[in-house]
Amino acid sequence: MTRTAIPLPHLIGFTDRGGNWYAEEVPLAQLAKEFGTPLYVYSKKALTEAYQAYDRACIDATGKRRARIHYAMKANSNLAVIDCLRQLGSGFDLVSGGELARALAIGADPQSLVFAGVGKSADEIAQALKAGVKCINVESISELHKINRVAKELHCRAPISLRVNPDVDAQTHPYISTGLKGNKFGIAYHEVLKTYREAALLSQIDVVGIDCHIGSQITTTSPYLDAVDKVLDLVAQLKKEGIEIHHLDLGGGLGISYGAECPPDITEFTNALLNRVAERGFGYLDLVLEPGRSLVGNAGVLLTQVEYLKPGVEKNFCIVDAAMTELMRPALYEAYHGIVPVQTKAVENVTYDIVGPVCESGDWLGKDRSLAVEEGDLLAILSAGAYGFVMASNYNTRPKPAEIMVDGNKAFLIRAREKMVDLFANETVLPK
Ligand code: LLP
């Protein structure tokens, strides 16, 4: 079967100009020549426009800010990417000590940081408290007590919100659904009030917010509204009990188009959420959104070179130099990414599975794609700006690729390709 029916996603920053793909003003073929493949290429313009559209949607007609963006850097944590977003005014959602270190490395204001994650270690909690983050999102009663203990040792107070598991179906891939009661994330809905009461009694804890995140690549607004309603029911009950919540964090998860999907318009999406909060009488709460993919997903492509065309009995294979090690999403979620030849060729279209060199049958990047390519040609794997490089691995002792950011007619190397020696620099053989 050939998947001709799936259109290309609408892209800003990447265009096909008469059969040659460009990143802004720079031909992708030129980047491949200069920096080699596989190669991640991001467009600063795409990143900037995505952020600005989101930001505008968080401001009402009178210019009043209705919500703040804390970019979920797990989607793409390259320093150049997060620094661009910081300069545009973004805060950050972090899930590890490593991400916190990245935020501090670019000079992010600690008060623009929320620290989340289902299994924070005592060291990570201490790191967050010492940095002075705005809030730690708590995922269990045990974690709440651990935070209290660490804060006591550090003679400080810990601002926290509880991550509620609202038990709503985000209607997305099961591996990226997080708000169902069977998921490991958040505090079970029926235990949230009890946990807030306990938090209010702990000596070092300041209850500041409430949080939920129901999943990723969500393409309809209704699961969010279900979650908002359930979380606001809790806020109302807490208010009655004298536990005041100052901010409401609705997480991230808004999907992008990889081709076939039609996610809601960003302004309609935020209006639906923010209006629901206001209609229910909670317009006084500070609102936090944690988008990841919807800011960076379509701001990046992965360039790869065709190594071999291999006709098969049942399938034809287009073997490229990128693999599941560079882009894990197809192997892990059977995710679809658009794939285009970087330069149009007058050769016959053939239906291929596009696969990498890694020793796994799960190592594929696209299935049943009709392509007019020859060995040595370049392909661009689209919508690779989110959960691409960050999920890369060194499996099969493959060096991680370089990353480039294009700004107009300039290309900047924002992460050098790993060298072979880097791959085992931290290993030693046993003494002789
Ligand atoms: N906030 C929290 C607490 C999260 O866990 C996540 C993502 C986000 C925000 C950002 O979600 P986004 O806006 O990017 O959907 N590797 C998967 C996605 C995993 C998402 C994990 N959490 C993929 O490639 O589809």
Image (tube, rainbow, N blue to C red):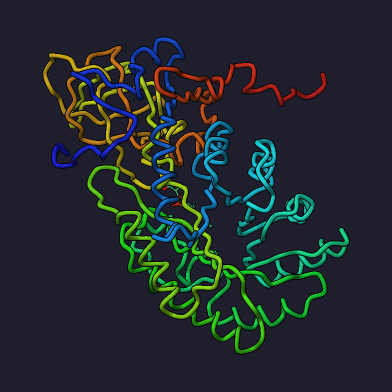
Q: Is residue 279 above or below residue 303?
A: below
Looking at this rendering, what residue extends furthest in the bottom direction? 240
73 horizontally vs 407: left or right:
right
The N terminus lies in quadrant: top left
116 horizontally vs 266: left or right:
right
Q: Position of residue 62 (x, y in %)?
A: 43, 61
The C terminus lies in quadrant: top right
243 horizontally vs 261: left or right:
right
Q: Position of residue 348 (x, y in %)?
A: 11, 18
Q: Quadrant of residue 191?
A: bottom right
Looking at the image, which residue is at 36% across and 52% down?
255
Q: Position of residue 414 (x, y in %)?
A: 54, 24
Q: Nearer the viewer, residue 376 or 47?
A: 47
Q: Is residue 242 above or below residue 38?
A: below
Question: Exactly how many numbered labels are in the figure?
Answer: 0
Looking at the image, which residue is at 66% across and 86% down?
242
Q: Position of residue 212 (x, y in %)?
A: 52, 66
160 horizontally vs 336: left or right:
right
Q: Nearer the viewer, residue 351 or 52?
A: 52
Q: Nearer the viewer, residue 269 or 195?
A: 269
Looking at this rendering, what residue extends furthest in the front direction? 62
Looking at the image, which residue is at 65% across and 42% down?
103
Looking at the image, which residue is at 53% across and 26% down?
400
Q: Is residue 81 above or below residue 249?
A: above
